[in-house]
Amino acid sequence: MENLKKKILDEVRKNIILDTHKLGVTGKEVHGCILSLASRDIIEYEKQERYLPEITEEGKDVLRNGSHEFAFYSSIPDTGLLVSDCASYTIGKAIAFKKGWVKKEGNRIFKARADVVDEIRAKLQDLGFLESKELEMLRKRKLLSTRKECYYIVRRGKNFDEACQDLETEITSQMVVENRIPNLKPFNFSTYGTAIEFGSLHPLKKMMREIKEIFLCLGFTEMDTSHYIDTAFWNFDVLFQSQSHPARSPSDTFYVNAKKEVPEVPKDYFDRVQRMHEAGGLGSVGHRSSWSPEEAMKLVLRTHTTSESARNLSRIAKGPFRPRKLFSIDKVFRNESADSTHLSEFHQIEGLIIGKGLRLEHLMGILEEFYVRMGLRKIKFKPAYNPYTEPSMEVFAYHEGMNTWMEVGNSGIFRPEMLRPMGFDEDVRVIAWGLSLERPAMIKYNIKNIKELLGHRVDIDFIRKTPICSFK
Ligand code: PHE
């Protein structure tokens, strides 16, 4: 582009008026340069159009073999041609008759003249000298077509002289050595520089950081949640979720078909969980149905991070009692059909507090505190059911912008059937919750469809442009 611009300016300087057709370049390239130069009043231009003749395939054939009529004429021997043998020369025959080149005698056709010249072919060979009438005739015979071409008549604009000075764009060491003051090109402060390529955090990651910050400020410790693949035992059984619970069916849960490296499970704890399911004890009647160890050892993609809470709790239960606050933010998987708010992969914000004398109001209090810090000031709780918590509450948050209540999570107090087999004393209470990360992220970044946030359709530019996440 710069080269072409320079060429245009050189030509205009030399010739005063330039017909860009003479530059030997056409089309968009010239157009771009002309517009750019004209926008800075370096040149003025008029756009012109012309129609250029182009020889068609049929025309090329005439150039090689002569016109139809000439080919017909030439094929006639002195003894003439039988009319019945001329069937293949329909066009050529008709024109040759019209021009008086041939005549018919009886059932034979003879040449009528000896001085015939193939002027059609001659015209095609010399298109530049033809008049428009002749061009039109060749076009009608489909030997020529016309192509539209744009070109520009270019004159000097009011800034022409300035632009033609060779302004320097940088100061070099040579200039300093020669003590030469360069004629510098002025800065253009109204143009953008080249966009800088940079890495950027995914908006969900930004959100996770902020949420992590909130929990850390509230004195929580982050849990290890490294088991994407886990046994049904940790995902369901330790949570006192009966083996016949519908959520365990493959229509809700992804089972993993791999035999190797099943995470190990402490034998004594495994037995206590089985006993709790089958027979109850420690104050519970259990599920009173048989419990299959094989079912428990099946591998699943974890459907919630409560499996990780359970694993962490069972470890903590072995040590001396101490109140604790734990949280995690990580990925979970469910066999959901995807729509604008659901994917089969999403994130949960999980948390729990271990203490004595903890009650429902503590749970409500901490969740309220958490959401206030996330900028959601109005929180509502709705009684719910979970196999592993009693009581249980769904959590709703009011979104001011959208003017609606939306479900943001689930919570409750872990049942003794879950905690006692781990080894916790009867008076130890654990309040816990599992909250959505994507919901608030969609609200925060004003995303209508979850596919714009997660998965292969996410626009890399969207990720680059999302602002930092701040709940203030
Ligand atoms: N595991 C629940 C879910 O996935 C959330 C939850 C966690 C509920 C802890 C109660 C206690 O919805």
Image (spheres, grey):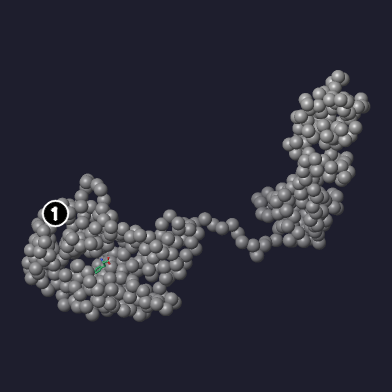
Is 85 placed above or below 438 here?
Answer: above
Q: Name the side, left or right, on which 423 lies relative to 446.
A: left
Q: What residue is at 83 percent from the left and 36 percent from the top?
A: 124
Quadrant assignment for the C terminus: bottom left
Residue 402, x across and y down, in percent = 43, 76
Asked which quadrant contains residue 348, the reply is bottom left
> Dot 1, how many residues are within 10 Å of its Cα: few (below 14), some (14-19), or many (20+)?
some
Q: What residue is at 33 percent from the left and 71 percent from the top?
A: 408
Q: Which residue is mark 1?
A: 293
Residue 64, x across and y down, in percent = 78, 29
Residue 66, x across and y down, in percent = 81, 30
Query: Which amino acid, by three-letter code, is at mark 1?
Result: Pro
Q: Residue furthest top?
A: 79
Depth check, front residue: 397 or 6: 397
Residue 79 visible, this orientation: yes
Is 10 placed above or below 285 here?
Answer: above
Mark 1 residue's CB less than 8 Å from ligand 1: no
**Ligand 1 image position (quadrant):** bottom left
Residue 279, x across and y down, in percent = 7, 63
Asked which quadrant contains residue 249, the reply is bottom left
Q: What residue is at 35 percent from the left and 76 percent from the top?
A: 397
Depth check, front residue: 469 or 306: 306
Under circle 1, the secondary element is helix
